[in-house]
Image: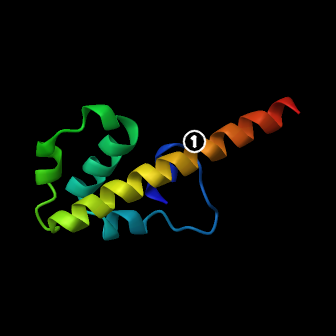
Amino acid sequence: MYLMYIFGIRDDATDYKKINIVLQKQHKIFIKRMMCDPYNTTRDDFKDLTKLKPEERAHVALLVMETRRKVELIYVTKMMSLFI
């Protein structure tokens, strides 16, 4: 939901105040960098996630990229509906 929030897609049923409780600042920075600028993400960015195991870091990266695809599809659908 945080990733969708970054791109301006909001869900009325979601309490976005809980994001700051669930995600630490370093995690939010990593997620935002992977979401907005994936080609400039470096190995050092993964090292900032010190509390996660390597397989959990990879899982987070996959979730971010899958959510990015979902957000792009939602955005394209909304834009197409404006022209119809």
**Residue at x-position 59% and y-position 54%:** 10
Residue 7 on image: x %, y % = 51, 43
Residue kind at label 1, given as amino acid type: Glu
Q: Nearer the viewer, residue 18 or 57?
A: 57
Q: Nearer the viewer, residue 16 or 74?
A: 74
Q: Horizontally, is 35 left or right of 53 in the view?
A: right
**Residue at x-position 89% and y-position 33%:** 84
Q: Horizontally, is 33 left or right of 67 in the view?
A: left
**Mark 1, residues whose alpha carbon is within 10 Å: few (<14), some, or many (≥20)?**
few
Q: Horizontally, is 68 left or right of 31 in the view?
A: right
**Residue at x-position 34% and y-position 63%:** 20
User: Which of the 4 image quadrants contains residue 77?
Assistant: top right
Q: How many marks?
A: 1
Q: Nearer the viewer, residue 6 or 39?
A: 39
Instruction: Name the image colouring.
Output: rainbow
Task: Give the vertical position of 40 relative to 77 (above or below).
Answer: above
Residue indicated by mark 1: 72
Residue 83 on image: x %, y % = 84, 29
User: Which of the 4 image quadrants contains residue 76?
Assistant: top right
Task: Give the vertical position of 77 relative to 21 (above or below).
Answer: above
**Residue at x-position 77% and y-position 35%:** 80
Q: Secondary structure at mark 1?
A: helix
Residue 45 on image: x %, y % = 17, 45
Residue 71 on image: x %, y % = 56, 47
